[in-house]
Image (cartoon, rainbow, N blue to C red):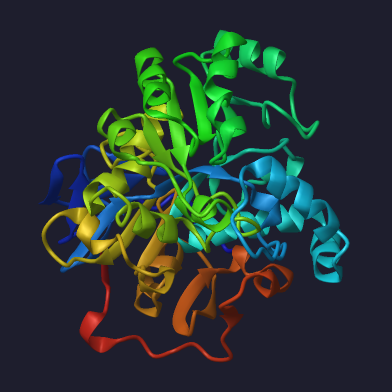
Amino acid sequence: MAAPAAPVDVCLDGARVAHAGGAVHAPLALCAGRVAASVTPAALHIALPRHLLLPGLINAHEHLHVNAVPPLPQAAPFANSYAWIDAFAAHFRAPAVAAALALPKPLRLRHGGLKNLLAGVTCVAHHDPWHAALDAADFPVALLHDFGWSYTLHGPDYGPPLAQSFAAASAAGWPWMIHLAEGTDAVAAGELAELERRGHLADNTVLIHGVGLGTHDVTRVLACGAAVVWCPSSNLTLLGCTLDPRRLSAAGRLALGSDARVSGGRDLLEDLRLAAAHGLDATQALRLATTAAADILRLPERGHLAPGAYADLLIVADRGGAPAQSLVGLSRSALRAVVRDGRPRIADPDFAPWFAAVGVDTVPVTLDGVPKLMAAELADPELLALEPGLEFQVAPPRSRKADMVQVCHA
């Protein structure tokens, strides 16, 4: 990539900027990868009338490396995740599964990152062992680093031991994650009590799924300040049902995760849509992937666009009204631009002047049939080959005259 000689400050003009209470028409200044309090005199100004700026989404639960693995065919819901794991053992022998898992792990991890970026996710909690590939400076998304995790209470034997992992995360003041109550049977229903007996239910405990939590369990979770990550697409696929999000959401102790395509839906935008169809309104659903997720995962510089926050954001057409109404229900191809560290990463073709001004080389692609420009560093042919709906375009499209993004220097 041909980087500029010096970082380019940017001011996004004319758009509404989303915040916790709604949205306001105000310029948004980006400087050195952060949202700035004021516009610098030499800033590059980008006119975005009739647009809405939202913080990049936070995916609070993901397994990045298995998004190209074909899902397990199933005729009926599983009683719990352990039954799904047992059934998957034979699925490993399927040729398509073996081929997917034979791909280099760095490529599979990067694919998971790209899948998230295409859906407006700019920060991911990867619930698996750390890999050196995740430290790459050009990895598609930011990652949660400061956290502890274990896999489950009852196997498989994978990941850090519960007691040691929980103790280390608690001592460091980090969130600690575990798949828990992922089912509809007595096994799932008894897991919170067992976790509490072991001394691992605390204000840093983050329970993944929680479908089997009863009313008393939710009360216990809230009483100790713990939280749950809700993955509705995965729950509905594997279990045939999902949790009631209302009490946890009202208390700010519910975040949203996509899990992975091997067991869930396409991306976090699908889970946002499902959240808004299963007990929450659009505004409440969006909080799960922004402010609530940032609070639960202890990421104070994410989930909002206040000065000092990371300059990770989404640009969408403004439908008016509550900001969430302009995002929840959109497909990924309808996002006008996804921005990381103050630089566009994938956007509609009329954002070409912004890419050029900040020194980001681009490659024309189509996303679900819609022309886009993608940062060239992300356009690895092996990577694009893994992502359904993402293809190289032979020739760049003409920009839409009526919706042209205007760029000028102050």
Which percent across, then down, holds residue 264?
56, 57
256 left or right of 66 in image? left
- Residue closest to the eye, 387 or 246: 246
Which percent across, then down, holds residue 272?
37, 55
Which percent across, then down, holds residue 287?
30, 42
Q: From where the camera sits, is residue 179 visible?
A: no
Which percent across, then down, holds residue 387?
63, 70
Q: How many marks?
A: 0
289 left or right of 144 in image? left
Q: Quadrant of residue 375?
A: bottom right
142 left or right of 294 in image? right
Where 215 falls versus 75 (above or below)?
A: above
Query: What is the residue that sits farthest to the front in this orientation?
Result: 186
Where 108 falls versus 142 (above or below)?
A: below
Q: Quadrant of the N terminus?
A: bottom right
47 left or right of 89 in image? left
- Residue closest to the eye, 309 or 330: 330
Residue drawn at (41%, 56%) of the image: 339
Residue drawn at (68%, 32%) of the image: 151
Q: Quadrant of the C terminus?
A: bottom left
Q: From where the camera sits, is residue 97 visible?
A: yes
Residue drawn at (64%, 12%) of the image: 168
Residue drawn at (43%, 21%) of the image: 226
Where 74 falls versus 371 (above or below)?
A: above
Q: Quadrant of residue 110?
A: bottom right
Where 390 falls versus 225 (above or below)?
A: below
